[in-house]
């Protein structure tokens, strides 16, 4: 969805905040069999289009995920920052 939004609406800022098990989407060095989608490649495409990607820090801690293990350009964050994003967003989607 983020990549399609970036493609169709280049004038908007797309932000992704990963929580719970979704923080694993930002692990660098993902290897998938040919023919299967690779979340890391999708994340990098979004990042290259200006999407901001942040991970819940406590969710990452609970899963043993460190800042050194995540895709370059993604960032550890917190609930305060998520709250700020929601409060200042024109629209919010959750999946």
Image (spheres, grey):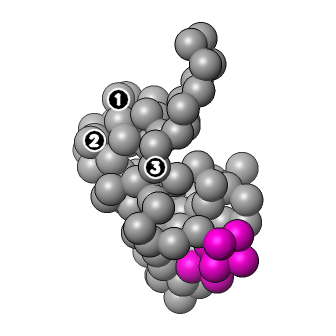
x and y percentages locating residue 67 in the rendered image: 44, 71
- Label 3 packing within 10 angstroms: few (<14), some (14-19), many (20+): some
At mark 1, the secondary structure is helix
Spatial separation of the CA atoms under disc 3 and disc 2? 18 Å
Disc sitting over residue 28 in the figure: 3
Cβ atoms under marks 3 and 2 closer than 8 Å: no
The first of marks 2 and 1 along the sequence is 1
Residue 85 sits above or below residue 52 on the image? below
Residue drawn 65% across and 72% down? Answer: 64
x and y percentages locating residue 75 in the rendered image: 40, 69
Residue tagged 1? 7
Cβ atoms under marks 2 and 1 closer than 8 Å: yes
Q: Looking at the image, is mark 1 or mark 3 nearer the viewer?
A: 3
Q: Say if residue 86 shows up in the picture.
A: no
The first of marks 3 and 2 along the sequence is 3
- Comparing 89 with 50, the one in front is 50
Query: In the rendered view, does 77 fall on the left or right side of 25?
Result: left
Magenta highlight on residue 23: no
The span picked out in magenta is: 57-64
Residue tagged 2? 49
Spatial separation of the CA atoms under disc 2 and disc 1? 8 Å
Quarter containing the N terminus: top right
Q: Say if residue 80 shows up in the picture.
A: yes
Residue drawn 59% across and 11% down? Answer: 35
- Comparing 76 with 68, the one in front is 68
């Amino acid at each position: 969805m983020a990549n399609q939004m970036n493609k169709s609406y280049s004038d908007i800022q797309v932000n992704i905040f990963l929580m719970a098990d979704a923080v694993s989407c930002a692990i660098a060095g993902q290897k998938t069999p040919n023919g299967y989608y690779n979340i890391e490649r999708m994340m990098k495409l979004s990042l290259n289009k200006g999407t901001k990607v942040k991970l819940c820090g406590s969710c990452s801690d609970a899963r043993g995920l460190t800042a050194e293990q995540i895709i370059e350009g993604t960032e550890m964050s917190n609930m305060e920052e998520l709250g700020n994003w929601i409060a200042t967003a024109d629209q919010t989607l959750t999946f």
